[in-house]
Amino acid sequence: MSRPTPIRMGVAGVGSLGFHHARILRDLPEVRMAGFFDVDARRAAFVSGKLELEPAGSLRELLSAVDALVVAVPTSSHEEVALAAAGRGVHLLIEKPIAPSLKAADRILAAARQAGIVVQAGHVERFNGALRAAAAYIDSPLFIESQRLAPFHPRGTDVAVVLDLMIHDVDLVRMLVKAPLADIAAAGIPVLTPSVDIANARLTFRNGAVANLTASRVSSEGQRMLRVFQRSGYVRVDLARGRGEFLRLRRDLPALLEDVREASVQEGGAGPAGPDPGAAPGLEDIVERIPFEGFPEEPLRVELEGFRDAALGRSDPVVSGDEGRAALEITLCIEKRILDHVAHSRTS
C-alpha cells in the first residue's frame, strides 16, 4: 500500500559515503531530509555546515524524526543501529556488508520481518550506469571475470578486502548468473594491514558458470572492470569509466569467409590458411564491436530513489535484505578460504 509523501528520511553515520547519502536525500523529490547523526561531533558539525542540515543529538532523537533510515555507520555497528530502527518501525537501507556476521544479519532480518519494514542492502554497483546499459547485451553468462583494484586508503581497513571491495562483485555475479553456488576456491594475503589486502576467488555454479574475482586495495591505479563471456559474445563493462562494449561474431561472417576462400583460390592459394596470409580475415573482419555508454544518473541517487519507492510501498527493493545476506554468506566463505590459505602458507 502506498504511503503519503514526502517521506521523512535520515542518515546514521556521515563519513565519506554517508555524507553523499545525506547530500542526495536533501534534494530528492518526495523526500524530506529529517536529519542525520554521527557519533563524531566534529564530523557532524562539518557536515552540518557543508549541507546546511541540523544534526540530531542522538540516534534515538533521529529515529523519532524519520520514517526511513540509511545506515552508513561502520559495519561493526550495523546491527545495533538497525535493531534500534526496526524497533521503531523505521525502514532501512543498510550499507554493504549488511552485517559483520551471518548471525547478526539474521537478527536484523528477523526484527525487520516482525516490524513489517523494508530492508534494502546498499550494493550501489547494481545501479552503475554502465552495468544498467550492459543489461541489454548480457544473456546467460558462462564465465565472468571481475577486477576491482584500488589504491590504499585507511577507510574500510577494519574489514578484509573481501568484505570491503570484493563483496560488490560477489553480488553482481549472483545477480547475473542466477544459479546456486557449487564451489569456492580462494587465496589472498595481507600486505599493508593485518587483514587480507589482495584476494582472488573462483566461484563455480551448478549451471556450469564460473566467475573469477580479484580485489585489491594496494594497487597503484584504480580499476573496476567486469568481463562477461557467453554464447552470444563477450561484454566488457568499465564500471569506473561508465562505458563498455559488446563483441560478437559478425552476422555476415559465413558470406565473408566464402568471399575470402574464393579470392584465395583465384590467386592460387589453398584458402585462408594458404600461402597468402593477407587474404585471411583479421579480428576486426570477424568481430562486430558495439560500444555503449552508461546511463548518466548518479548510481547512489538511483539507489536512493529505489529505496524511497520501496519505503513508500510502490515497489520491492532492488537489492533485498535477503540478497544482502546471500552476498555476505558467500563473501564470508571466501574470507575463510583465504584465511585458511594464509595460515597454511605461514606454516609450510
Image (cartoon, rainbow, N blue to C red):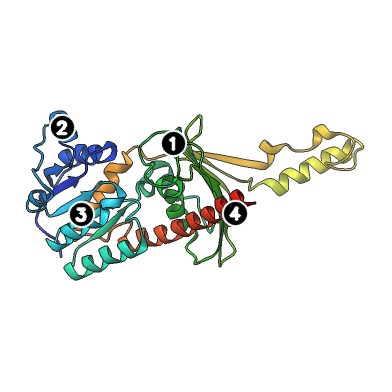
Quarter of the image where one finds residue 105: bottom left
For label 1, the residue is 240
Q: Which residue is drawn at 59% across and 49% down?
A: 346
Tell me residue 134's x, y (percent). Answer: 46, 46
Amino acid under label 1?
Answer: Ala
Q: Residue at x 40, y 33 (%)?
A: 153
Name the residue furthest bottom. Answer: 114
C-alpha distance separating marks 4 and 1 = 35 Å
Near-viewer residue (343 or 324) = 343
Amino acid under label 4?
Answer: His
Quarter of the image where one finds residue 250: top right
Residue 142 seen in render: yes
Q: Earlier in the sequence, mark 2 or mark 1?
A: 2
Report crowding for label 2: few under 14, some 14 to 19, many 20 or more residues within 10 A (C-alpha): few
For label 2, the residue is 51
Tell me residue 99's x, y (percent). Answer: 32, 56
For label 3, the residue is 81
> Under tag 1, what secondary structure?
loop
Q: Which of marks 1 and 3 is nearer the N terminus?
A: 3
Amino acid under label 2?
Answer: Leu
For label 4, the residue is 344
C-alpha distance separating marks 4 and 3 = 37 Å
C-alpha distance separating marks 1 and 3 = 31 Å
Q: Earlier in the sequence, mark 2 or mark 4?
A: 2
Is residue 227 rendered to the left or right of residue 161? right
C-alpha distance separating marks 2 and 3 = 23 Å
